[in-house]
Amino acid sequence: MTKRIGILTGGGDCPGLNAVIRGVVKASLVRGWEVIGIEDGFDGFLHPQKCRALGLEDVSGILPQGGTILGTSNRGNPFRYPILRQGKVELVDVSDEVVSVISALGLDGLIVVGGDGTLKIALELMNRGVPIVGVPKTIDNDLLETDVTFGYNTACEVATEALDRLHSTAQSHHRVMVLEVMGRYAGWIALESGIAGGADVILVPEIPYDIEKVSSAIVARSKRGKRFSVVIVAEGAYPKGGNRVVKEAAGGKVAVERLGGIGEMVSRELGGYLETDIRATVLGHLQRGGSPSMFDRCLGSRFGVKAVELIQEGSFGRMVALRGRRIESAWIGDAVRHLNLIDPEGEMVRHAEELGIILGR
Amino acid sequence: MTKRIGILTGGGDCPGLNAVIRGVVKASLVRGWEVIGIEDGFDGFLHPQKCRALGLEDVSGILPQGGTILGTSNRGNPFRYPILRQGKVELVDVSDEVVSVISALGLDGLIVVGGDGTLKIALELMNRGVPIVGVPKTIDNDLLETDVTFGYNTACEVATEALDRLHSTAQSHHRVMVLEVMGRYAGWIALESGIAGGADVILVPEIPYDIEKVSSAIVARSKRGKRFSVVIVAEGAYPKGGNRVVKEAAGGKVAVERLGGIGEMVSRELGGYLETDIRATVLGHLQRGGSPSMFDRCLGSRFGVKAVELIQEGSFGRMVALRGRRIESAWIGDAVRHLNLIDPEGEMVRHAEELGIILGR
Amino acid sequence: MTKRIGILTGGGDCPGLNAVIRGVVKASLVRGWEVIGIEDGFDGFLHPQKCRALGLEDVSGILPQGGTILGTSNRGNPFRYPILRQGKVELVDVSDEVVSVISALGLDGLIVVGGDGTLKIALELMNRGVPIVGVPKTIDNDLLETDVTFGYNTACEVATEALDRLHSTAQSHHRVMVLEVMGRYAGWIALESGIAGGADVILVPEIPYDIEKVSSAIVARSKRGKRFSVVIVAEGAYPKGGNRVVKEAAGGKVAVERLGGIGEMVSRELGGYLETDIRATVLGHLQRGGSPSMFDRCLGSRFGVKAVELIQEGSFGRMVALRGRRIESAWIGDAVRHLNLIDPEGEMVRHAEELGIILGR
Amino acid sequence: MTKRIGILTGGGDCPGLNAVIRGVVKASLVRGWEVIGIEDGFDGFLHPQKCRALGLEDVSGILPQGGTILGTSNRGNPFRYPILRQGKVELVDVSDEVVSVISALGLDGLIVVGGDGTLKIALELMNRGVPIVGVPKTIDNDLLETDVTFGYNTACEVATEALDRLHSTAQSHHRVMVLEVMGRYAGWIALESGIAGGADVILVPEIPYDIEKVSSAIVARSKRGKRFSVVIVAEGAYPKGGNRVVKEAAGGKVAVERLGGIGEMVSRELGGYLETDIRATVLGHLQRGGSPSMFDRCLGSRFGVKAVELIQEGSFGRMVALRGRRIESAWIGDAVRHLNLIDPEGEMVRHAEELGIILGR
């Protein structure tokens, strides 16, 4: 039986979004279904012209492209939708309107591609009768129930290449180079890129660091003739007994990926212990834009196909998930019940420490 | 208790070998163990100067480098070791000598990094009392018991980038471009890179192809206005009812990655059906050399650490293995009992077909 | 005064073509001019639907893309245009028709982007009154009057990366790796990539090689402990006293980038002298497709702008050219009077030899 | 006649330094000369153990590596050498000692690889009788007398790739993305990468910007349906009537590539005019570390060879220089008489503007 389905992408940029959209469109058209692309996340339901049929031509050539052809929006939460009233922004609940638009569109299923926040909104709409299928999307890899999410591999590739670049400068100039990467609550990017990029120190939010332990390790390296070190630090890392120094948007719409965050803080702290020159770099948006890696293109494509399969079999409320080499599915509620954090006593941390990497504890 | 262990690398080149070696050395030195690197595979045991202690300096800076600092050899099978006698090469069994050298070296464990062939040799030596731990290594990803092997991700990245390059020429010149990639028995590289690179046709050894099906699909595309197609074919693919056209070494030591293999054959076959220009390219050694991807550097490093852990706990006869996000282990015998082939009715093939890709059946 | 100009791209693929087209369109629209894009080279003039206005939307996002949005064709020579008559292909002169179409289109200038062959055709049309401006395009960098052409830098980057990949395999396996690159008459790609990629031997058409000199050098390296070598050879290279072994299209429309060309020949010849394993790889189309390098994107863009400037000042018959950091112009006739070949006694060859590289003479 | 020469590298990191060193060593050994590598710039002369013979093994495999195997130092100016006296750092003139060490080493020539600062020091030593040959080294390309310097091409490649990454996020999220790149006095990196990366706005030190002009252009784009823009800004850019907001080292040895520099300032200024979200990124050290591009590897190698040739012919006081495709030479004094800045009325700026790029004037 032919169906009409919708797809939207929510939240921050993530390499592989276009692969998912293309996979959904191709697998739907093969079935003779119709696909409606909703632009700018849930906000698109409030603007009729933003809901448009997607054909093969729309997804031709988008596989290697970063970003999302559907766009996203800051007004992506219909339960807290910003409306300007008498010169002030109020957050109002427009979910009734969204639900009725979805109903009017006659969607037999709605594929929501998003992270923790977007999927929680999707769950609420599910409870209001919208037939939802989820596709997990997070650069930070902090969702449960799936081995990894698309975009994470590309982000780690970019961070590893950055470590390679900083490494040669560190070595030539006998310096400590500090690289701040994404990861507000989960330090996976720092941990995996740090292992791959040969970092000497990895600091993650899950393991508050002791700066003396870090500086001693660098000094010890120096005594062994290694007059340089490379440090990778997740943006949400913080010192033992301290608080997170999460970067704040510089106010309103101008959000600067500024230092003054943890990368700079670690540099200054180390400066109190070391005689070596120290330099900090913030990788920022370079991690989330741009062409996806092979892994993320394949994973995104398969996630898209699987989402269509879930709609076909009526498995609503579920999210596609990678397990080993297979694409399976899980309840969205299970995936967002808490964040997928690094286990400080877990295997990957142990492997890092056996490789001689300092985690600052 | 301190230990003395050995490590060798066998078989063809594979990005990530140096990451494994570095992981083994770092995790051993952390334990206060001694590591003996054996050069040129099992052949190294027959040359005392090829067995040398590895220290931190030996593995410094090798993480991003392709190849293996230990080298490999064509004389890697001690049960069939080539010896020149009276002007003729004879294959003799020198395994007794190898076993006694290992014994004399006082190795508490020997880490063998290799594919199907090398691991089978390792098993035989295990039966002769050598305490073996295996690390799976195959570009083709054709070993059982592990989700993937290191090197495979890099090979797929290289193949995907090649597809991207061929794609733009195909489109501009209205051509069919054929790319031949590795995969003598297992078509994983062609399948996964084909999905990631947006191939229109994927031909693998596990699914003998019908050239008429392939050409009809290309003609159908052309009628929809797509005057070009990109075909990826594993070197071991073959037509329905036909035989494998595996490339032969051009004789002895000069092995040319020649066309005249399946890439050329598919091109000629298609030439009989299509009016379009057709061009074939053989990716060859570009897939197996060069700097490993982030994924393979991290996986290789963790495999190295895990191999040391297996020796520590006395788990001989086992091979490290990736399962989801964890590094586990499996019996070497289970990993090599048959090749890990694509299931023609399996999920990844189905996903490819739902994406509109032709597999020629 | 507003103008109406045309642009077409001829000959083989070359990274940066889209940058040129985009540059022409942007610089024209800034002037209030109209741009007609002619698809599939000169063949487009014979098909009214292939001559279409180009606007900003048509060139949006094409800067990083390989290929040409205008396409090219095998029927690009209007003086020898293939027409099927009574089952046979005849080459007829359709230049009158082309000239009259150009006249009917009311073009104040026609920008022809092409290599030696295409520019010679352009000159003939110029003599028939068509106001031509040329943009040099050749992967091989074999045009006179310009320091380099766009696309050449990208090709050399790809070849250098290939050398890097082969290098690690050569070293690990104690092999000689041979890489065949483009350059039928001019060996610039082999020479410049060979220097950048650390090749041990570079063979170019301008210097017929003596295989004994090459093998002696490899043996000498081996005696110094370097048990491997990397050889780069231009497709048009040939042995002293021999003939070019230029690859032949495998017949008609199926042109296979086959070995059996010079890469394989050099491998076999070396096989007669060396005990080492030898492997050959043909880079083929991977050199000419795909995203252009920064250099070629900038050069292509500036070439496009300069071509518009030449039309504005009425400098017809001229070709844009890079001289140092400036874009200047030259007579097309001067650029194609003979090929720009490597001077065997020139500076770049001398530099290569001072770097210890063997050129086989 | 055999010679003994020295080589040192001064100043900041720059991709291609190792190619120069390798070129010098290879071209010297071919002549039977001896090469002394001086570690950590001029500081090495004050530490006998830092002056060591360089052989083929020392330069084997360094061609693709970033950084410099000779290291550099913050104490690179012998005329103002920092010495700790009674707890305070004093800058003293140790040039006599340096000159006498050079004399004692018996150097027939000293190759100094460095930028504006290092080459001026070299000139002063030249006046004291040291036989100097210069090799220009500046990421910013701000030296006269040479078309470009090595390292600049790699920096522009990195910046262009960063623009590509930011572009997709800008487009998907309808944002203005601001990228701050190097260029304290000369904006070449911003200008050339901006053209290659399709930037909408390029701000350079040579053209003080009017923020209203910039914001109007972005608003105009938005009205044409382009709801995003990409801005590239050199670190030394500044508003009309304002001062340079050059980033200051955060004090002493901890120099943080911080925002609070011009990238952040432009973002905030734009925030006052636009409703769009704005994000800033600082590329920082990622531009100067890491593996050099093909172009810089070839240029660096040839510069190294040419420097040796200059010593051979006794052309002291001269610096190697690229002119078109040739390596020539110039008086060091001519190269450093003032910085090589962008001509605001020059060709490359005009080309940028004809491409529709806003320079803010």
Image (spheres, coloured by chain):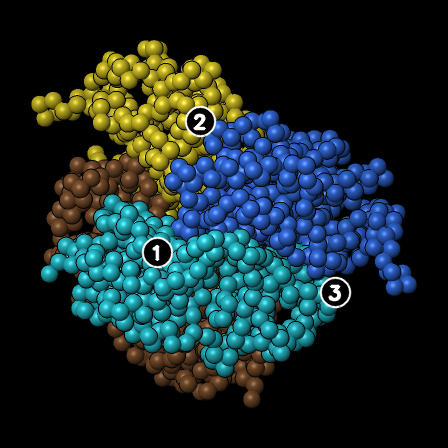
Chain colours: A cyan, B brown, C yellow, D blue
Q: Nearer the viewer, mark 1 or mark 3?
A: 1
Badge 3: chain ID: A
Which residue has dot 1 on it? A43
Give the image location of residue B3, x and y in percent: 54, 84
Q: What residue type is labelled 2?
A: Val
Quadrant placement of the N terminus of chain A? bottom left
Q: In the image, is residue C164 above or below residue D27?
A: below
CA distance for labels 1 and 2: 36 Å
| Amino acid type, label 1 | Asp
Q: Quadrant of the C terminus of chain A?
A: bottom right
Quarter location, residue C74: top left
Chain assignment, label 2: C
In the rendered view, tell whether residue A108 sits above or below residue D188.
below
* CB within 8 Å, label 2 to label 3: no
Residue C20, position as x, y percentages in the image: 41, 31
Check if mark 2 and mark 3 are on a common chain.
no
Whether discs 1 and 2 lie on one chain: the answer is: no
Residue drawn at 51 percent across, 50 percent down: D278
Mark 3: few, some, or many residues within 10 Å (few <14, many ≥20)? few
Residue at 64% across, 65% down: A265
Residue that carries the numbered disc 3 in the rendered image? A275
Q: Quadrant of residue B332?
A: bottom left
At 22% across and 54% down in the image, what residue appears? A35
In the picture of the structure, the residue carrying the numbered disc 2 is C30
Mark-to-mark CA distance, 1 and 3? 53 Å
Residue D171 in sight: yes
Secondary element type, mark 3? loop
Residue A150, disc: none
> Residue at 52% of width from left, 22% of height from top?
C328
